[in-house]
Image: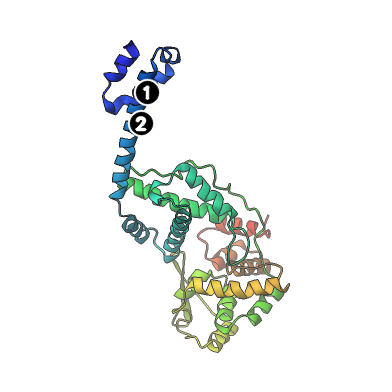
Amino acid sequence: MNAIAQRVTATPAANVQDMALRIAREAPTLADLAPDQLEQIARMVMAQRLTQELNAAANLAGINYEKEKNVFLDNAGQSDHTRRGYRNAIARLDAWAASHNINPLELSPGQADDFIYYLRSEKSEKTDREISPATVRLTTAAVSSFYTFLHRRHKPIENPFRGSKARPKEKAVRELAVPSEKEVKAILKELPPMESAAVSIMAGLGLRCGALPTLEKKGNRYKATSKGKEFYTDLAPDMVKRIEKAGLSLRAPFARKTANSIELIVAYYIKKMYQAGKLAAAYSCHDFRHYAAVREYTKTHDIKKAKEFLHHSSISITERYLRSLGIKD
């Protein structure tokens, strides 16, 4: 047996793979090994790899995935909106992994990239448009946070999304949609009473759809919560009339509704109108916030008033928002 073979047989099994890699780098001396010696190294390396795979599988088998997911979601953010975003992102990953027969706990970096590429090509059922790059980035960030959480609690699990180059860059691929006043009136006429009341409030006050279920009358005003922030607002007479026509309570009109159910029904009717050629785009509920922002700013050109109207935390956010709508340099 030559010197290399002696080094291999004298090496503890736990270090065989490292030894084999060092031998592989010594290409000129590797040729000195006999075929049976090369086969011996290969068997030892494969045995070590199998042991590592079995150990990893045993470690993963001891992780209650559903329990860990619930712990993460119960503590992910302060608002229901944020937690819902995390929940939807992980649910989307779980569905994709199941369709590819992949255990989420064993997701590789390459598979993580494939998931992002899938998101980038997916179309929204609500609008029949490709999901925006911002939504893909948010979904990726959410599942990445989940894997970071898992790694802190279970060291064998790595975050396969860390360092990915697959997520889209921070730039819009299309202009944000803003319905015209004529289109808003047509939509309000077409929608069922409850959804018509919801859209009148979103288009008139710039409220996000997620804020509607929290809308509650306090004295002579209404309190709402959006992205964890509470604020007060007033309903115009026509909004009140629509709420009454829909048979909703003026105290808390949408308390028994969910933002998702409102979005789905509104999207259904708007898609029909778009397909019939009545609208320029298949608008989403959030596009009514765009409409309200444009209308408010063009009335006064006062950035401070626009900030207060949109309930932004800073003027810089309002400026970026208005630029994205193409109405501020």
Q: Earlier in the sequence, mark 2 or mark 1?
A: 1
Residue nearest the observer in this picture, 184 or 90: 90
Measured as percent of width and height from the top left, residue 144 is found at 44, 49
Question: Label 1 belongs to which residue?
Answer: 39
Measured as percent of width and height from the top left, residue 25 is found at 43, 18
Instruction: Name the quadrant of the N terminus.
Output: top left
Q: Where is 159 relative to 136, above or below? A: above
What element does badge 1 sit on? helix
How many numbered callouts?
Answer: 2
Q: How would you rate the neighbour count of disc 1 (Cα within 10 Å): few for under 14, some for 14-19, many for 20 or more?
A: few
Measured as percent of width and height from the top left, residue 76 is found at 38, 58
Q: State left or right for residue 10 relative to residue 248.
A: left
Q: Which residue occupies 58% across, 62% down?
A: 124
Q: Where is 188 relative to 111, above or below? A: below
Residue nearest the observer in this picture, 146 or 81: 146
Measured as percent of width and height from the top left, residue 172 is found at 63, 53
In which quadrant of the rendered view does residue 202 lie? bottom right
Q: Where is 56 relative to 299, above or below? A: above
In this view, which residue lies farthest toward the right?
A: 277
In which quadrant of the rendered view does residue 217 lie? bottom left
In this view, which residue lies farthest toward the front?
A: 36
Residue nearest the observer in this picture, 118 or 30: 30
Question: Label 2 belongs to which residue?
Answer: 46
Q: Which residue occupies 50% across, 74% down?
A: 261
Residue nearest the observer in this picture, 137 or 59: 59
Q: State left or right for residue 153 relative to residue 176.
A: left
Q: State left or right for residue 9 relative to residue 97.
A: left
Q: Which residue occupies 65% across, 82% down?
A: 189
Residues at discs 2 and 1 in contact (Cβ within 8 Å): no
Q: What residue type is labelled 1?
A: Glu
Instruction: Name the quadrant of the C terminus.
Output: bottom right
